[in-house]
Image (tube, rainbow, N blue to C red):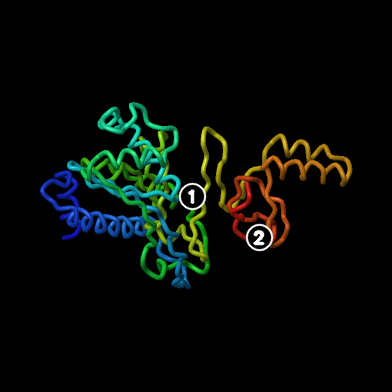
């Protein structure tokens, strides 16, 4: 019944549904995706365990309203929310610029521009910037203790079952692709003026989830590895590798590594002091401590 309801909604592009109903159907669609992703791969190897993942950190919300809209945007930090508000004010400055005490041009300072703009609007527009922390004690997930990444045959089957989800309708989410329950959104963001790639792992098939609750990722941009948390380990910079190979003394090797740390090509594991390439998301020592990459690392 759920599958039928979701299919009908997708075919009708969400018409005649309230925002609450759309949210309910999206959650049902996500649950179905999780079940289907697990079905593509083999059943869990025994034994398994339930782990609780770290809750999502707080986010900053910008709510902005006027006679025509009442919208909320999500940001990772407060500065980004205020920067977006500043862009909105400057983009609409002509509505009040030059009238009364309003200058013809917006001041350079975003804070001053926002204060002048909203003082001139006479209460017809408003905004608020505030922090929210997602409720709940953290997401629980079933993971195999005897972890083995899917075989080549299973990977091929999962890849062949990949699905593209187009944007369901105006204002109802963004387009995404899905492989083994891993959902990747790729879209144009006018606020950031950038192409955004966002990977979501909540619905990942259990067979790709490690015992610590994480999913191994290997991310490339134009052939360059920008993130690696896979079993094979992140690649080293080829120039750095050649320099280290050419080092004839321990002092030369140490000098090269020190320069690489300064340049951001390496980061040192705080637990075992192993030097890791920049793209590694966790320590790749041959005796894997798997300590996560420090936030202060390049």
Tally the numbered discs: 2
Give the SS element for disc 2.
loop
Q: Residues within 10 Å of mark 2 (few under 14, many from 20)?
A: few
Q: Percent from the top left, x then y, of residue 18?
A: 15, 53
| Residue 99 picture location, percent across and down | 26, 30
The quarter of the picture where residue 20 lies is bottom left
The mark that comes first in sequence, 1 or 2, is 1
Task: Judge by depth and name the residue closer to the eye, 150 or 282.
Answer: 282
Single out the residue that lies furthest toward the left. 16
Q: Residues within 10 Å of mark 1 (few under 14, many from 20)?
A: few
Nearer to the camera, 179 or 103: 103
Residue 247 appears at what percent x and percent y? Answer: 84, 40
Who's the residue at 34% across and 43% down the image?
176
Residue 91's x, y, as percent?
A: 32, 31
Q: Which residue is mark 2?
A: 288
Q: Residue at x 68, y 49 (%)?
A: 267
Query: For mark 1, what is the residue?
Result: 152
Mark 1–mark 2 distance (CA, rounded to whole Å): 24 Å
């Amino acid at each position: 019944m759920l599958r039928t309801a979701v299919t009908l909604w997708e075919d009708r592009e969400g018409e005649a549904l309230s925002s609450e109903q759309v949210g309910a159907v999206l959650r049902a669609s996500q649950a179905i995706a999780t079940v289907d992703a697990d079905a593509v791969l083999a059943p869990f190897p025994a034994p398994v365990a339930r782990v609780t993942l770290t809750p999502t950190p707080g986010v900053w919300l910008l709510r902005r309203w006027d006679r025509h809209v009442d919208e909320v945007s999500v940001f990772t930090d407060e500065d980004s929310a205020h920067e977006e508000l500043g862009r909105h004010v400057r983009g609409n400055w002509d509505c009040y610029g030059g009238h009364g005490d309003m200058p013809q041009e917006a001041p350079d300072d975003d804070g001053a521009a926002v204060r002048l703009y909203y003082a001139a609007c006479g209460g017809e527009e408003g905004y608020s910037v505030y922090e929210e922390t997602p409720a709940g004690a953290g997401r629980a997930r079933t993971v195999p203790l005897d972890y083995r990444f899917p075989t080549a045959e299973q990977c091929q089957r999962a890849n062949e079952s990949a699905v593209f989800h187009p944007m369901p309708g105006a204002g109802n989410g963004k387009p995404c692709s899905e492989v083994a329950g891993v959902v990747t959104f790729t879209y144009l963001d006018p606020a950031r003026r950038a192409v955004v790639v966002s990977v979501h792992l909540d619905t990942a098939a259990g067979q790709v989830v490690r015992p610590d609750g994480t999913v191994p990722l290997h991310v490339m941009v134009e052939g360059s590895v920008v993130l690696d948390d896979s079993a094979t380990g992140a690649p080293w910079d080829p120039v750095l590798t050649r320099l280290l190979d050419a080092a004839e003394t321990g002092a030369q090797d140490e000098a090269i590594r020190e320069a690489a740390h300064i340049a951001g090509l390496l980061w040192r594991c705080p637990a075992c002091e192993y030097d890791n390439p920049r793209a590694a998301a966790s320590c790749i020592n041959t005796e894997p401590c798997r300590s996560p990459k420090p936030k202060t690392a390049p």
